[in-house]
Image (cartoon, rainbow, N blue to C red):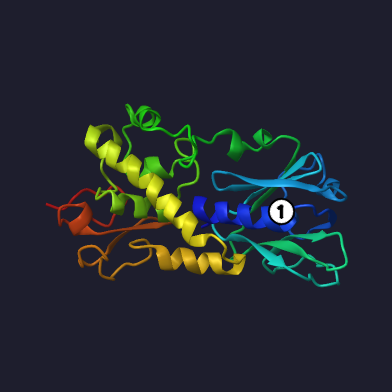
Amino acid sequence: MPELPEVESLARFLADHLAGRTVERVYPVAVHALKTYDPPVTALEGGAFEGVTRYGKLLDCQVGGLHLVLHLARAGWVRWSDKLPVVPPRPGKGPLALRVRLAGPDGAGFDVTEAGSQKHLAVYVVRDPREVPGVARLGPDPLSADFTPAAFRALLEGERRQIKGVLRDQGVLAGIGNAYSDEILHAARMSPFKLAAKLSEEEVDRLYAVIGTTLQEAVERSRGLALKDLKAEKKSGLRVHGRKGEPCPVCGDTIREVSFSDSALQYCPTCQTGGKPLADRRLSRLLK
């Protein structure tokens, strides 16, 4: 799933490549992905790109006073092409959901795609990005100047959930998902099941620090890469997430996993849980 660093890199790439360009045609291939109908997606045609920004894990392309907002969900992506096919795409069972062709002789543009059979990609065309429910409910951005240690402490105050779930809650912090919450907790040497309300002041400060460094380092690793290389860079840069059975790069212990119905987390027992494995069930506690 694209998270804050990947979407930030997407935004920077598209901002560079779309500057000064105008939309010639928009092809809504997967109609189920369209979540708004007024204005229609075709209202983008003839509009000039005014910028590309990010709201958490959502991408916002500003076009002629409108906003094309993309929620890439678990398997969505944006694919740039210096020359799109001349033949218009047809609706079908493939991954293509939306095509945007730019005006000009080069035929450049981009495709919005979604792999797999579970289709959760969402495309919005709105006059104000706050009309998008996923934007309206977002908590502070971890890379913004407003995300201070005091603000983070206030977010955790009275929070009775496990810290893993808190970090993934987009209403608490915008942009952190399953992968980077694993990475952050590993860097903080903290159990994913520790209750947020029971964190000491030192633990809160440590967690705050590694949130910033982990995300910023991931963004910097992606700087200048082509869109087709961003996913591979993310995978190669992860230390524990998706690396069940591999040695921890810090201590050498075996990375373990806890599976849930629709996701899984990875962690290092030595670095994060005092050497004790976590039981692999939904309401897991440390084994005794």
Residue at the far left: name it.
288
At label 1, the amino acid type is His
Position in image of residue 275 (x %, y %): 15, 57
Q: Which residue is drawn at 62% across and 52% down?
A: 11
- In the image shown, does 154 or 13 lie closer to the viewer? 13
- In the image shown, does 285 or 64 lie closer to the viewer? 64
Mark 1 residue element: helix
* Residue 5 visible within the image: yes
Q: Which residue is drawn at 77% across and 40% down?
A: 66
Residue 108 occupies quadrant: bottom right
> Which residue position holds label 1?
32
Q: In this view, does 140 lie to the left or right of 81?
A: left
Exactly how many numbered labels are in the figure? 1
Q: In this view, does 187 lie to the left or right of 31?
A: left
Q: Residues within 10 Å of mark 1 (few under 14, many from 20)?
A: few
- In the image shown, does 121 or 86 lie closer to the viewer? 86
Q: Is residue 27 left or right of residue 217?
A: right
- In the image shown, does 120 or 247 lie closer to the viewer? 247
Residue 134 occupies quadrant: top right
Position in image of residue 75 (x %, y %): 56, 61
Position in image of residue 106 (x %, y %): 83, 68
Position in image of residue 51 (x %, y %): 71, 46
* Residue 178 visible within the image: no
